[in-house]
Structures are given as C-alpha cells and as structure tokens.
C-alpha cells in the first residue's frame, strides 16, 4: 500500500458500517486487518467521513506515521481505538474537538530487538490532555498504554473528577505520569477499573476511611504505592471495596 491511504467503494468493505437511513458511513472497524501506510495522514479520505462515530485501527502497522490534526474534524466520533497501530508523534491538540467521545484507546508499541524500524512513543502533552478532559465530558473509558504523558501533572489529573458521572474505566499503563495521584480520583462514584501500573514516579495513597466505590479492578503495581505510610501491608480501607476482584 502506498504512503497515502484512500478509501474506495466503502459499501463493499468488510468492517464498514453505514447508517440505514442516510447512507452515511458511521463505523470503520479495521481490527487486525494488516493495514499499512499513512492512514491518518493529511490526505486521508477518512477525514471526509464527518458522520463517523467509530474508528477502530487496533493491531495494524502504520510504520511510525503520526495522527494529523484533521482528526479533530471527526466531531461525531464516539469510539476511537488506535492501540498497537504503529503510530508515533504527538497526539494532536485537535483531538480535544471530539466532544462526543465515549471510548478512547491509544497506545504505542515497543520495537522488537531485531526490528530495523525503531518506533518512538506517542506523546500526549499537558495542554492536549486538559482540553480533552474539559471538552469530552461523556468519556466512559480512557485506555492509554505506553504513551508519554510525563508533562501531565497532578492538577491536570485532578480534572478527571469532571467525569464523575461518566467514567467507568481508567487505564494509564506505563505512561510516565508522575507526582501524586489526587485521592479524589480513587473515589469517583461509578469507576469500576483503575490501572496505573508501571508508572514508577507516580505516588498513590489510598483513602484511609470512608472509601466505598464500585471498583472491581485496582492495579497499582510498579507505582510508589502507600497505605498508612508503611508499605507492604494491605490498607484496611481496601476491605470496604466489596466488589473488588482484582487488586
């Protein structure tokens, strides 16, 4: 496939969903389709699909290409999945224009030892994160894996409390976030999954009392985790989480 990805005869493609009444393309699910090229480059036909609600590119290889700022034109997107797609570069600030987003999955991949192509991690800066969380108030799931978020600090993480009525799953896995996790994040009322693993410079202290949430999954391995200022013991407040199945 060439450097620019162009769509033709969409109705004939597997993974393409069209609205029955209008005929508009509303879904592209290219999960593990061995796609290659510069799919989200400046000339991509995908950006002309202004009614698109789902874009899934999980498990493809776009050879270190980046996401063009025109992604912000897909204002009807509700589901964006770019995990393990071989993309690098900055997550454009225009992603914050996607105010209807409910599911966001972005992740970098590690280069194999003998791979001649070396991928760098995608980067999500503090400004883009702040604008995204401020605008996309319907986010239900945030899954960011091996994305460089080292510039995102405690005050920016605290913005997640704005999603208290929507956020169900929060995964920031090996994202280089640092500082202290705002304790109110652990108390979000409908949050069922928190995975902050492999952020060695992130300090996490669990609530000492009155901690009752519907959490089912809590993973803090590889973080600077503490309970009552003595590591190695299970903080008593964890026993209040009656639905917790994985910790």
Image: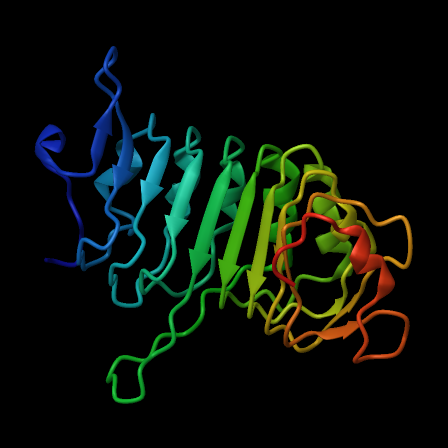
Outermost residue, bottom side: 114
Q: Is residue 153 above or below residue 167?
A: below
In the rendered view, tell whether residue 22 sits above or below residue 218. above
* Residue sitting at x 40%, y 35%: 73
Residue 180: % across, % down: 79, 66
Residue 224 occupies which quadrant of the picture?
Answer: bottom right
Q: How many marks?
A: 0
Q: Quadrant of the C terminus?
A: bottom right
The residue shown at (44%, 31%) is 75
Is residue 128 visible in the rendered structure shown here?
no
217 shown above or below 230:
above
77 and 225: which is toward the camera: 225
Q: Position of residue 135 (x, y in %)?
A: 61, 36
Q: Please name the residue shown 35% across and 59% down the image.
A: 66
Pinpoint residue 234: horizontal percent, then vertical percent.
Answer: 80, 70
**Frontmost residue, 5 versus 229:** 229
- Depth order, front residue of 16/228: 228
Q: Does the rendering let one see residue 219?
A: yes
Occupied quadrant, residue 177: bottom right
x, y percentage for residue 22? Answer: 25, 13
147 on left or right of 21 = right
At x 26%, y 19%, the residue is 19
| Quadrant in the picture for residue 166 | top right
Give the side of residue 196 with respect to residue 13, left or right: right
């Amino acid at each position: 496939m060439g450097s620019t990805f162009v769509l033709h005869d969409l109705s004939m493609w597997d993974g393409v969903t069209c609205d029955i009444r209008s005929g508009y393309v509303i879904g592209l699910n290219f999960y593990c389709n061995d796609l290659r090229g510069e799919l989200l480059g400046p000339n991509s036909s995908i950006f002309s699909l202004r009614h698109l609600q789902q874009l899934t590119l999980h498990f493809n290889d776009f050879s270190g290409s980046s996401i063009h700022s025109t992604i912000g034109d897909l204002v009807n997107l509700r589901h964006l999945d770019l995990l393990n797609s071989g993309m690098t570069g900055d997550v454009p600030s225009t992603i914050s224009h996607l105010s209807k987003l409910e599911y966001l999955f972005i992740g970098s991949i590690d280069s194999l030892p003998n791979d001649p192509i070396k991928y760098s991690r995608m980067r999500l800066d503090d400004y883009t994160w702040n604008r995204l969380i401020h605008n996309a108030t319907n986010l239900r799931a945030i899954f960011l894996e091996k994305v460089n978020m080292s510039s995102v600090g405690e005050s920016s993480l605290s913005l997640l409390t704005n999603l208290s009525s929507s956020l169900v799953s929060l995964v920031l896995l090996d994202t280089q976030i640092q500082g202290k996790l705002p304790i109110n994040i652990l108390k979000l009322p409908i949050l069922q999954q928190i995975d902050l693993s492999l952020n060695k410079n992130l300090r996490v202290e669990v609530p000492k009392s009155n901690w009752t949430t519907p959490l089912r999954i809590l993973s803090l391995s590889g973080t600077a985790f503490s309970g009552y200022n003595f590591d190695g013991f299970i903080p008593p407040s964890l026993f209040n989480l009656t639905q917790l199945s994985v910790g």
